[in-house]
Image (spheres, rainbow, N blue to C red):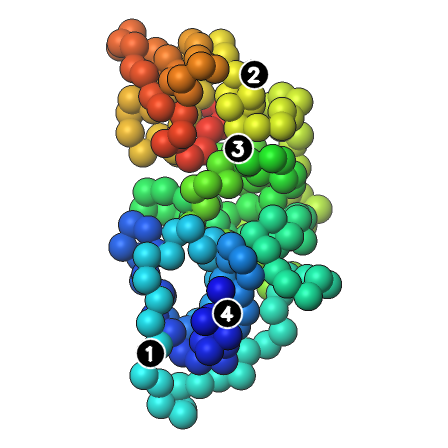
Amino acid sequence: MEYFKDFVGQFVNVEISGGKCFRGNFIDFGLDIVVIYNEKQFLYIPLVHIQNLTLSSANESDIVSPPEAPIDNQAENISYRKILNNAKGRFLEIYVTGNKAIHGYLTSVMNDYFVFHSIVYKSIFVSLNHLKWLIPYHPDVTPYSLNRQSIPFNPPPTTLSRTFKEQCTKLQGNMVVFDLGDNPNKIGLLQTVNNNNNMLELITANGAKVYWNLQHLKTVNIA
């Protein structure tokens, strides 16, 4: 990671999983995360999803001094987990899958997933392995300009388990949506989760049984 020191303060191009590309000021890095400022927002990007990173040609007029990073980190070195823990309670944009980001509040960080409260989707369980980026909003901004006092913070529908697999197991017998429903075969009745091979059985609307590999599922929420 020492080579990233040469990037700090420089303009860079970043390509992440899914072909998404960003250009901005390389602000900071840790063992498993980098921070980019694109002149409007700070992007916290887990290193595992960075496909490539290159220096970008920038004119002097392009370089803008970034404000203070919005997620405070008292430790000398940042990390993915520390950033998530320090982001709890903040209004965030996260991107996991599909063609849309999710907006809401991070409420809990577990062993390999976190709980995200969305105004639209309610409680979503998000695998740590699949978060592509996180963008904090300014503290004065609220979802859809709602009054802060009117934002419903409903508790998760179940008690929280330590791991994503255990949490999915706890949802057996419920109607669930995986990956925000980007595939109709990811919406249905969660029948079983096999702890031996990470496969789960989902019964879709037409009664068909579909088997999914849990390691490739990114989010789950109760329908």
Q: Whole-Å distance between the Cαs marked 2 and 3?
A: 12 Å
Tell me if label 1 and label 3 are in contact, CB under 8 Å. Answer: no
Q: Residue at x 42, y 9 (%)?
A: 191
Corner quadrant of residue 12: bottom left
Q: Earlier in the sequence, mark 2 or mark 3?
A: 3
Q: Whole-Å distance between the Cαs marked 2 and 1?
A: 47 Å
Q: Earlier in the sequence, mark 1 or mark 3?
A: 1
Mark 2, residue position: 170
SS at mark 1 in the image: loop
Mark 4, residue position: 2
Q: Whole-Å distance between the Cαs marked 4 and 2?
A: 42 Å
Closest to the observer, 184 or 73: 73
Residue 56: mark: 1
**Left or right of 66 in this view: 96:** left
SS at mark 2 in the image: helix
Mark 3, residue position: 125
Q: Earlier in the sequence, mark 2 or mark 1?
A: 1
SS at mark 4 in the image: helix
Corner quadrant of residue 192: top left
Above or below, 144 relative to 109: below
- The amino acid type, in three-letter code, at marker 3 is Phe
Q: Residue at x 53, y 33 (%)?
A: 125
SS at mark 3 in the image: strand
x and y, in percent, of residue 69 in the image: 61, 69
Q: Whole-Å distance between the Cαs marked 3 and 4?
A: 34 Å
